[in-house]
Image (spheres, rainbow, N blue to C red):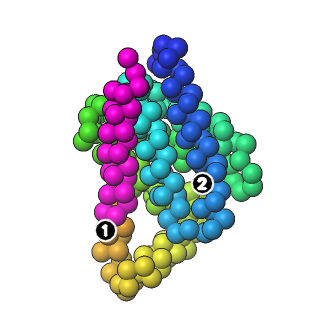
Amino acid sequence: MRNEPREFAYIVVFGTIWGLVEIGLGSLLHTLNVPLKGSILTALTAGVALTGRTFVPTRGSLLQMGLIAAFLKIFSFGGSIALPLLGIMEEALILEGTLIVGGLTLPAYIAAGGLAVLWTPVHFLFVNGILITGKFHLYYDLLLGLLSGVTGLGREKAGLLFLLLALFLFLIGALAGALAWHLGRDIRRSALP
């Protein structure tokens, strides 16, 4: 993971933007108690990170950006710090791993964004339901209730509700990945020699 000075600068810039989005928008979404705030935030930060990856085609650069974002998150006010740090690094691993497997192609960017956002409810259930409280069923019921309320479908259709959620989240992340791929390429073409 040796980077040239220009690549290192891009890693710092995009890692910093990622971290500032986590701090600023993350705090706002948390304060407003927006449903699926983690998924919304992940779609945006995945877009930032994947755009940055078009400038730094080096393996491991997304992990480096994630470390910078996580470091900045330490200075965030209020709430838990460790759990968002874990989420940031999970996101970086998913993005990096997907691009290692799929290459720097549009389908890989789409898959990376989709998988990162799709992971957010898993992170929510695992961290809150198992690590913190040990009451997985409470958080499962909370998520199921939210989905039931939003869709109007009854709780007895849990499988369909979770499938709809998964499809919705993947599509949001896929859109973020596609936008990042196009935006990064357009900026590189117009701004770099």
> Residues at badges 2 and 1 in contact (C-beta under 8 Å)?
no
Q: Residue at x 66, y 38 (%)?
A: 72
Where does the image place residue 137, in percent across and percent down from the top left? 51, 72
The 10 Å Cα crowd at callout 2, few under 14, some 14 to 19, many 20 or more, is some
Q: Main secondary structure of the magenta part?
A: helix
Closer to us: mark 2 or mark 1? Answer: 2
Q: From the viewer's perspective, tell me whether residue 173 is left or right of residue 4.
A: left
Residue 191 magenta? yes
Could one spot residue 137 in this view of the protein?
Answer: no
Under mark 1, the amino acid is Leu
Residue 69 is situated, as x and y percent measured from the top left of the image, at 59, 38
Q: Residue sitting at 60 percent across and 55 percent down?
A: 26
Q: Position of residue 153 (x, y in %)?
A: 35, 84
Q: Residues within 10 Å of mark 1 (few under 14, many from 20)?
A: few
Whether residue 118 is visible to the viewer of this picture, yes or no, is yes
Residue 174 or residue 193, whichever sits in front: 193
Number of disc labels: 2
Q: Which residues are magenta?
A: 167-193
Indicate the secondary structure of the residue bearing disc 2: helix
Q: Nearer the viewer, residue 67 or 30?
A: 30
Residue furthest out toward the front: 190
Marks 2 and 1, how far apart in space?
A: 27 Å
Q: Is residue 124 left or right of residue 159?
A: right
Q: Which residue is mark 1?
A: 163
Location of residue 134 in the rendering, given as x and y in whole percent from the top left corner? 59, 64
The residue lying toward the viewer, choosing from 175 and 149, is 175
Say whether residue 182 is left or right of residue 41. left
Q: Which amino acid does the dot numbered 2 rest on?
A: Leu
Q: Which mark is residue 25?
A: 2
Q: Please tell me whether mark 1 sits on a helix, a strand or a loop.
A: helix
- Which of the marked residues, 2 or 1, is nearer the chain's N terminus? 2
